[in-house]
Image: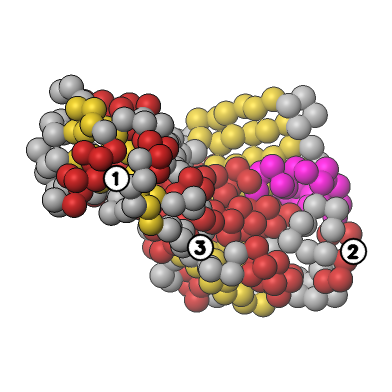
Amino acid sequence: MPVTIISPAQACDMNVDGRLLIDIREPHEWAAGIAQGAKPVTMAELQAQACHHLVSFDEPVILICAGGKRSESCAAELGRQGYTNLFSVSGGSQAWIAAGLPVSAYQASDFDRRYARQMILPNVGREGQQKLSHARVLLVGAGGLGSACAFYLAAAGVGHLVIVDDDRVDLSNLQRQILHKNGNIGEFKVKSAKNALDDLNPSINVEIHIDRISAENISTYINNVDLVIDGSDNFDTRYAISDACTRQGIPWVYGAVHRFEGQVSVFNASAPDSRGLCYRCLFPQPADAVDAPNCTEAGVLGVAPGVIGILQATEALKYILGIGDSLSGRLLHLNLLTMSIHETRMQADPACRMCGSLVGAGSP
């Protein structure tokens, strides 16, 4: 469907008569003023979610940008989607202002300004950002993995973070646990974490608990969360997380580091395409302490938990937004010394004592 090019004066008259005028520029451009009567919707959001802004396929829609090129391109894309009554303003807002037509001040909300670069992504948009703001995530551990993961989840706008940890900040932590500072030494990590995250993004809710996750208490924290992220450094905690998530049908993001290496995966035993796959399918029994020393015993390159923690945050955001390919059923192994990545495909163990009874149940 061809796009009709109109002058700013024609667009103004049509808008006065009730026709929809949409300014498809970016929020930082709106700050300089928008055509009076125009509805501000970024080009990416409009193209990705046109049905949220346009009443019908034949509704007259006038698009305006800065100079006219983006509005033509956007109208052409909407035409390919089936919209048939599209207009583009020649010369855009620059010509509108030059013609002396009325302009309104635009004050972007804190929400729009904070998440502007994320919301322009076609597969995020305002709807995706709202999903993030309504999400509840349990983060077990505020150490190396939890520090990087929490920072990016908070920055991305995950609305409710529950952080559980019973440890205090030590000087030896600061080489990798970036949530904490020298002045926090001796303080409980969850308190230090909350202060840092509140400073980063005061619009989200950070709930903290001074506790150590175990099989006995995890049910206290796992209720009413959408996702669990493991930032622990021991098998007992991971088994407690996996078993509880398997029982409750809650996905969780696994991460682990050792010296210069790290692993990350997603376990979702209730998902139809990976039913029965839990952490015990991969590691039926805890490794001997000598084979799995922690950071205190084996050492760790400071950036290693940061890289893995960021990957965990990435998987969490993808899950909440419902985009991309999850690491569910795949174990990603990263070696920082060689900068190599190895992926291992995982399958459910029918003999798994935790989830074996789920294998095949509800499968297509």
Does the magenta segment cover residue 26?
Answer: no
Q: Along the polypeptide, which appears first: circle 1 or circle 3?
A: 1
The amino acid type, in three-letter code, at marker 3 is Asp
- Which of 179 and 301 lies nearest the eye of the viewer? 179
Q: Is residue 265 left or right of residue 232?
A: left
Q: Along the polypeptide, which appears first: circle 1 or circle 2?
A: 1
- Spot the residue most to the top: 2
The N terminus lies in which quarter of the figure?
A: top left
Depth-wise, is mark 1 or mark 3 nearer the camera? Answer: 1
Distance from the alpha carbon under mark 1 to that under mark 2: 54 Å
The part of the image, by quadrant, that contains residue 180 is bottom right
Residue at point 79% right, 72% down? 168
Residue that carries the numbered disc 2 in the rendered image: 171
Depth-wise, is mark 3 or mark 2 nearer the camera? Answer: 3
The C terminus lies in which quarter of the figure?
A: top left
Distance from the alpha carbon under mark 1 to that under mark 3: 21 Å
Magenta extent = 285-309
Residue that carries the numbered disc 3 in the rendered image: 110
Q: Is residue 272 left or right of residue 84?
A: right
Distance from the alpha carbon under mark 3 to that under mark 2: 36 Å
Q: SS of the residue at dot 3?
A: helix
The part of the image, by quadrant, that contains residue 223 is bottom left
Residue that carries the numbered disc 1 in the rendered image: 22
The amino acid type, in three-letter code, at marker 1 is Ile
Report if residue 231 is visible in the image.
Answer: no
- Which of 310 and 52 lies nearest the eye of the viewer? 52
Question: For the residue carrying disc 3, how many other residues have a C-alpha within 10 Å: few (<14), some (14-19), or many (20+)?
Answer: few
Residue at point 80% right, 76% down? 187
Report if residue 38 is visible in the image.
Answer: yes
Q: Along the polypeptide, which appears first: circle 3 or circle 2?
A: 3
Q: Which mark is residue 137?
A: none
The amino acid type, in three-letter code, at marker 2 is Leu
